[in-house]
Amino acid sequence: MRPLDPAIERFMQGRVARRSSAALPERSDHVSPGNPFIPTEDPTMARIQPIPLDALPAPLADAVARGGANRMLSSTVPVQVWAHRPELAQAWLATLETMHVNGVLDGRLRELVRLRIASITTCKACQLARKDDAVSEEDIACLSTDDARFSPHEKAALRYAELFAADYMAIDDAVFAELGRHFSTAQIVELNMFCALMLAGGRMTYVQQAYAE
């Protein structure tokens, strides 16, 4: 095993208190040793055994370290589950990192959208995470598309995120026309892709129970 990257170690110490692989419960007799599924009723336990951080391939470990340093990641546990397919995990993180570091949407807007979708997917890790200080706890308590605290372009994005996650068939030309009044084409495309990643990521994390203890 490769030594644990210091950046990941700091990240874990500051944000994630995760049991080691040695502390994982024994599998039931009907589960083969090669099967990572961990049958459990404990809602804080991942259903698929996370890969230990010190066993991650170097490129994925580096991506995790960067994600912790720039607050893109609030927990490594979902990535440790995805690490059973490291190339796919790395590709997912690369797409997120591009939006997080070089996106055309501002950080506050992305965070509002992310949290609105998290409230719909009920992904615990997503709901508890805080990734941009420009969003206050008061903002989070009032994530409504008609709340006066939000600007017109924030309301439009929140409305789109809400429909995207909960009622996507209601998205029509009028919804896109409203987006067009506030955002460039590139921003609308990024908003679409960001909503898709947040919705998929939240649901994957929820069903896999890939949460830190």
Image (spheres, rainbow, N blue to C red):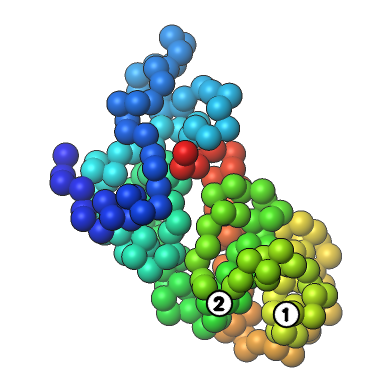
User: Mark 1 vs mark 2: which is more N-terminal?
Assistant: 2
Badge 2: few (under 14), some or many (20 or more) residues near its Cα, within 10 Å? few
| Relative to 138, 58 lies left or right | left
User: Which of the 4 quarters of the picture holds residue 113?
Assistant: bottom right
| Image coords of residue 177 (percent x, y) | 78, 84
Gap between marks 1 and 2 measured at Cα: 12 Å
Viewport quadrant of the N terminus: top left
Residue at the image point whose x is 61% and y is 76% from the top: 109
Vertical order, 162 against 14 (above or below)? below
| Image coords of residue 136 (percent x, y) | 61, 71
Residue in front for this viewpoint, 94 or 101: 101
Residue at the image point whose x is 21% and y is 53% from the top: 5
Give the residue pinned by disc 1: 150
| Relative to 204, 32 lies left or right | left
Vertical order, 18 against 47 (above or below)? below
| Relative to 72, 2 lies left or right | left
User: Which of the 4 quarters of the picture holds residue 140?
Assistant: bottom right
Is residue 147 visible to us here? yes
| Image coords of residue 147 (percent x, y) | 80, 75
Give the residue pinned by disc 2: 134
Give the secondary structure at mark 1: loop
| Image coords of residue 161 (percent x, y) | 70, 67
Check if mark 1's residue and mark 2's residue have beta carbons within 8 Å: no
- Residue furthest top in the image: 29
Residue in front for this viewpoint, 31 or 46: 46
Q: Looking at the picture, which amino acid does disc 2 mark? A: Ala
Is residue 195 visible to us here? no
Vertical order, 70 against 7 (above or below)? below
